[in-house]
Amino acid sequence: MHDVPYLHTTHVRSNFDVKEQIREYWSRRSETFDQSPAHGIHSKRELATWKRLIGDSAEGIGGGRVLELASGTGEFTRVLRALGCEVEGLDLSEAMIERASRKHGNDVRFYLGDAENAMLPDGRYDAVVCRHLVWTLLAPEDAFRDWLRVLKPGGHLVIIDGNWQHQALVAKVAARVAKIWDRISPRAVLYDAVAHRLIQDQLYFREGLLPDRLTGMLRDAGFTDGHTGPLQGVLASQLRAAGCGATVLAFCSRSAGPSS
Ligand SMILES: C[S@@+](CC[C@H](N)C(=O)[O-])C[C@H]1O[C@@H](n2cnc3c(N)ncnc32)[C@H](O)[C@@H]1O
């Protein structure tokens, strides 16, 4: 006889850390990540739109030293490099970093690491940029404080993300069409809806990433001049490429005054 209660499968809990699940998930998706319309930047027009948006909104970013968190396959790195930035990328997934390194060679240094605790030097960067990372954080308050720490005084934090749980109807329809296309396309993008849902249920922003809440959290972490707004022009480009939207953009600065 067993002296421990028999475990029914419904009672079995995984002790596999959620961050490991996130890493596995994105590593699997790395192979075909760039094929998704909202991930890969598929036209010169979209690249130019991103470039204008980031350049206009984060004053002085061009030519600066930028930390790109969750650099993925290095797609958004292209935007930052087109702005003349000296980019350092960081990502949790080795498979993602391999792809990004292939794209950017020795021009960009990539770190394998956790964006929630970057372990990079204080005051090193003119800007910290991340696209589609914040929705997946587990402890965003700690992460934001860490991002503030690595910024130079007066540096910018640029967050591009979406309230994926509460998309506008048009974005929902576009996302649904994109997912169906992903499944039937000869170049399927390895989207795993079950794994995605399992991860999402464990995230801090599992109820959705609301711009006002994000702005408040960034303020509490010590950022100033925060504002959020739509990604004008980008959504149109992505919709043209059958992508999805509901995207939020937040710009914040680290105060140029003495740090507390
Ligand atoms: C949706 S992809 C976005 C990739 C890239 N930012 C882009 O927009 O093309 C999410 C990326 O975040 C990375 N990621 C997720 N959580 C992370 C963490 N805590 N630290 C570093 N990278 C993380 C994943 O490995 C994956 O590459």
Image: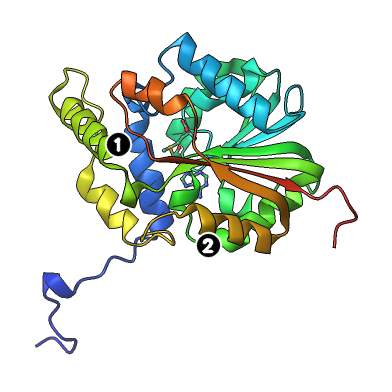
Check disc 1: other Cα within 10 Å, few if <14, some if 14-19, many if 20+.
many
Q: Are marks 1 and 2 in contact (CB under 8 Å)?
A: no
Specify the quadrant of the image occupied by residue 85: top right
What's under tag 2, amino acid-wise?
A: Ala
Percent across and percent down for residue 84 are 70, 18
Establish if 114 lies above or below 246.
below
Q: Earlier in the sequence, mark 1 or mark 2?
A: 2
Residue bearing the label numbered 2: 139
Q: Please, what secondary structure does the residue beneath circle 1 have?
A: helix
Q: Nearer the viewer, residue 245 or 33?
A: 245
From the viewer's perspective, tell me whether residue 146 is left or right of residue 12.
right
The answer to whether 105 appears left or right of 204 in the picture is right
Specify whether residue 210 is in view: yes
Answer with left or right where residue 256 lies relative to residue 19: right
- The colour scheme of the drawn protein is rainbow
Disc 2 residue crowd, few under 14, some 14–19, many 20+, Cα 10 Å: some
Q: For numbered disc 2, what is the local secondary structure? A: loop
**Numbered tag placed on residue 171 in the rendering:** 1
Report the residue that reaches farthest toward the top: 44
